[in-house]
Amino acid sequence: MSKAKNGDTVKVHYTGKLNDGSVFDSSENREPLEFKLGSGQLIPGFEKAVTGMTVGDSTTVTIPAKEAYGEINEELILNVEKDRLPADIQPEVGMQLQVQQPNGEPVPVVISDVTDDLVILDANHPLAGKELIFDIEVVEIA
């Protein structure tokens, strides 16, 4: 049986969890995830885990933040004065917003804190800085 290698199109079923056991994503009750190994479509640690597996193989892998969505980048955390927000927005922790970059491109952000005068916006990926645990099963290699 052939082992998955760069350039192969691979289909896997997976469940992604955090250290506390909470599931953040899964292919359960969906079609398997299909991707070209080595193309950079997925986080590096996931591709590394699948490399060398054969159809029917299963594994559980712990991926450190640096091989997942990276560490938290403090430069992507912004302090914005409340009065700069649109009047119709009542900021709450966890609320998702979009801010415009100088070039006009939208960037998704999450409100991570609200004080009397400031709203703290975080543009890091929601899984940045987190160690991820994946259960992976290879179902097809082409």
Image: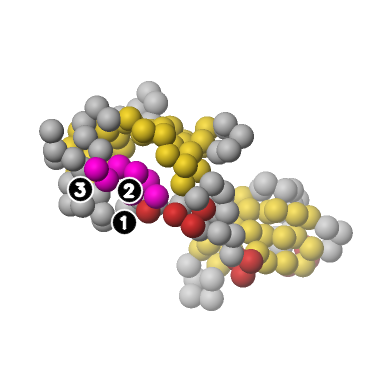
Residue at the spot of label 2: 47
Evaluate if marks 2 and 1 touch, with contact meaning CB atoms under 8 Å apart. yes
Disc 1 residue type (three-letter): Gly
Residue at 13% x, 33% y: name it.
Answer: 1
Disc 3 residue type (three-letter): Lys
Evaluate if marks 2 and 3 touch, with contact meaning CB atoms under 8 Å apart. no
The residues bearing labels 3 and 1 have C-alpha atoms spaced at a distance of 13 Å
For label 1, the crowd category at 10 Å Cα-Cα, with few meaning under 14, some 14 to 19 and many 20 or more, is few
**Dot in front, 3 or 1:** 3
Disc 2 residue type (three-letter): Glu
The residues bearing labels 2 and 3 have C-alpha atoms spaced at a distance of 10 Å
- Give yes or no for residue 47 being in the magenta stretch: yes
Q: Position of residue 48 (x, y in %)?
A: 33, 49
Q: Quadrant of residue 11?
A: top left
- Would residue 106 be seen by someone viewing this image from the given angle? yes
Among all residues in the image, which is located at the extreme top? 29
Q: Secondary structure at mark 2?
A: helix
Evaluate if marks 3 and 1 touch, with contact meaning CB atoms under 8 Å apart. no
Question: In the image, is residue 115 above or below residue 46?
Answer: below
Residue at the spot of label 1: 40
Among all residues in the image, which is located at the extreme right? 116
Q: Is residue 90 left or right of residue 142?
A: right
Q: Position of residue 4 (x, y in %)?
A: 21, 43
- Magenta region, residue range: 45-52
Among all residues in the image, which is located at the extreme bottom? 102
Q: Position of residue 16 (x, y in %)?
A: 46, 36
Q: Is residue 12 left or right of residue 28?
A: left
Residue at the spot of label 3: 5
Q: Main secondary structure of the magenta part?
A: helix
Q: Nearer the viewer, residue 100 or 10?
A: 10
The residues bearing labels 2 and 1 have C-alpha atoms spaced at a distance of 8 Å
Q: Position of residue 57 (x, y in %)?
A: 27, 30
